[in-house]
Structures are given as C-alpha cells and as structure tokens.
Amino acid sequence: MSSERIIKKYPNRRLYDTELSRYITLADVRDLVMTGEPFRVLDTANDADLTRSILLQIMLEEETGGEPLFTASMLAQIIRFYGGTLQGLFARYLEHSLDSFASQQKHLSENWADNPFEALSRMTQRNVEFWADAQKNLLRAAGFDVESRPDDEKKD
C-alpha cells in the first residue's frame, strides 16, 4: 500500500478517492489536509500531478468564505515574486517560516499548561534565532559576505 492516498480527477471535474473507492468533494480533500493525511491528486487523462491546483482551489474557497487569511496587499506582494530572481529563495523562506510557525504552535500548546511564561520565553528565543538565520541566508543569497564584520564596529 502506498504511503500517500491517491485521488483521481476525472475530466468531468469529479474527484475519486482510490482508498475509499468513492467520489469525494473538495471539502473531503480539505479534511485530508486538516488531518495531515498525505495525498496526491492525479489527472486520469495523463497522470499529471494536480495536487497544487486542488490545494489552490481549496484556498480560494477558504478565502472567499468567512474571514480571509491573506490581505490584498499580501497577495500582491507574493505575486511580485513570481519570475523574479528571488522566487526560489522566497518560496523556501515562506515554507520554512510556515513549518517553524506550525512547530511553535504545536510546542506551545503542548507546554502551555506546565509553565506558560517559560514556554513563551523559549518560543521567543527560537524566533530571534530563526529571524537571524533567515536574515543571514537572505543576505548571502543576495551576494553579501555576512561572516566578515566591518571595521567601524570595532570599539577603540
């Protein structure tokens, strides 16, 4: 058995869950995402991976109903990175940031009851380290030597 669930997308836009042997909806796929179930959506016509486009459809539905996660300004800023020299760097940075945020959220919820102030303090320290590393990586990618220190930082 495969480690990820396979969802087949038919030309009539219907989604078929091969594990459950039944048709499902985008809401069902959203539930898979929410439970952390690994899956891929494949086009039945050519086996092309459609997972990203299905996830974008789910995001669009989420954004149009209720309170949106992204502001128009945020979306415009993201669009500006497409085709730019920093597109790959931005994608890695965004993915790393989301992974870090999810990890911190999990850690905080697990440790909140024990000692909330200590949990917040550790989270803050990790955030400072994360942003310092992110800044160094961005400067390195832009061609700056981040290891050497300018002479004007030395105190007489």
Image (cartoon, helix red, strand yellow):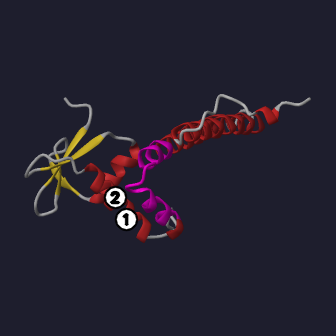
- The residue type indicated by label 2 comes to Leu
Q: Of helix, strand and loop, which one carries label 1?
A: helix
- Picture coordinates of residue 135, whole percent (x, y): 61, 41
Q: Which residues are magenta?
A: 74-94
Q: Is residue 36 magenta?
A: no
Residue depicted at x 37% and y 65%: 60
What label does residue 60 carry, if any? 1
The Cα atoms of the two marked residues, 1 and 2, are separated by 6 Å
Q: Quadrant of residue 62?
A: bottom left
Contact between labelled residues 2 and 1, with CB atoms less than 8 Å apart: yes
Which residue reaches farthest left? 45
Q: Quadrant of residue 92?
A: top left
Q: Residues within 10 Å of mark 1 (few under 14, many from 20)?
A: few
Image quadrant where one finds the N terminus: top left
Q: Is residue 92 left or right of residue 47?
A: right
What label does residue 56 carry, if any? 2
Q: Is residue 37 left or right of residue 97?
A: left
Which residue reaches farthest front? 151
Image quadrant where one finds the C terminus: top right
Q: Residues within 10 Å of mark 2 (few under 14, many from 20)?
A: few
87 or 64, which lies in front? 87
Residue depicted at x 30% and y 51%: 52
Q: Of helix, strand and loop, which one carries label 2?
A: helix
- Picture coordinates of residue 125, whole percent (x, y): 71, 35
